[in-house]
Amino acid sequence: MPIDPEAEIEITAYEWVPSFAQGQVRDLRPRWACEEYALPYRVRLVSAVERPAWYYEEQPWGQVPFVRDGDVGVFESGATLIHLAEKGGALPPVGSQERAKVLSWLLAAFNSVEPFVMEFVNCMVFSRKEDWAPLRRPSLATALEGRLKRLETALGDGEWLAGEFSIADIAMVTVLRAIPDPALLTAGLSAYVARGTARPAFQRALEDQIAPFAEHDPRKQKAKAENTAKEGA
């Protein structure tokens, strides 16, 4: 579903991020949900470098995503997924085991897997030049592999985590995509991620997230300003 400037749902995203983060920013999650559940949405872009002061009134840490749906504002990507799935009629009934399974796996992605992934990412990417990084990496890899092994066991021969595709899979697939060393993913989890990222809704969400980055690239902006200055000289 194409982005609709008149849509009621508004997703706040960053106008540009460095290349290593492109395709990984968490507004991808509600974008994907909107695409899956045929919910039109519009986008509001903010700077990741100089975040506007007013934005902290909506998102206390100035992070994305923030979703505005009429009079309702939601921050934290997990909360946005629940809200959008409810709106799209994609959550099982309250009190059902099916709903409990979806929500359990949604929170497991963020609480039982993502912290281990992000600590490993920090060591491999953000802090890779620190003296301690090579020493810390093996133990982090071992801890992450343990989490992933349990995840693969739970997934078993299933296609998705909670039966039918759900927001739990949006959460878990986006978490697993962030692992910088693909060798850590088992064959079963690699296939699981491939199934998720092959979905047309994911592809549309990813394309739309990346689209503004070229236009707002600081190097492009600088070159444009320099050319304007030369023309005016």
Image (cartoon, helix red, strand yellow):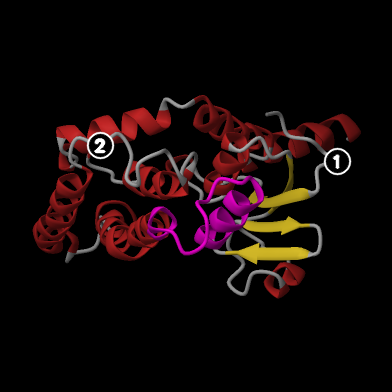
Find out whether the residues at labels 2 and 1 contact each other: C-beta distance under 8 Å.
no
Circle 2 crowding by C-alpha within 10 Å: few under 14, some 14–19, many from 20: few
Q: What range of the chain is rendered magenta?
A: 77-100
Q: Secondary structure at mark 2?
A: loop
Compared to residue 164, the image places residue 82 above or below, namely below
Q: Which residue is mark 1?
A: 6
In this view of the protein, which residue sits in the foreground, 94 or 157? 94
Question: Measuring 33% from the left and 29% from the top, which residue is drawn there?
Answer: 194
Foreground: disc 2 or disc 1: 2
Question: Which quadrant: the C terminus?
Answer: top right
- Residue 92 among those drawn in magenta: yes
Indicate the amino acid at tag 1.
Answer: Glu
Question: Measuring 14% from the left and 63% from the top, which residue is drawn there?
Answer: 136
Judge from the rendering whether residue 74 lies leftward or rightward of residue 7; answer left or right: left
In this view of the protein, which residue sits in the foreground, 139 or 126? 139
SS majority, magenta: helix
Image x and y of residue 181, in percent: 22, 41
Regarding residue 45, the answer to whether it shows in the image is no
Q: Earlier in the sequence, mark 2 or mark 1?
A: 1
Disc 2/disc 1 C-alpha distance (Å): 39 Å
In this view of the protein, which residue sits in the foreground, 123 or 132? 123
Image x and y of residue 166, in percent: 45, 44
Image x and y of residue 103, in percent: 42, 59
Q: Which residue is mark 2?
A: 158
Question: Measuring 65% from the left and 64% from the top, which residue is drawn there?
Answer: 74
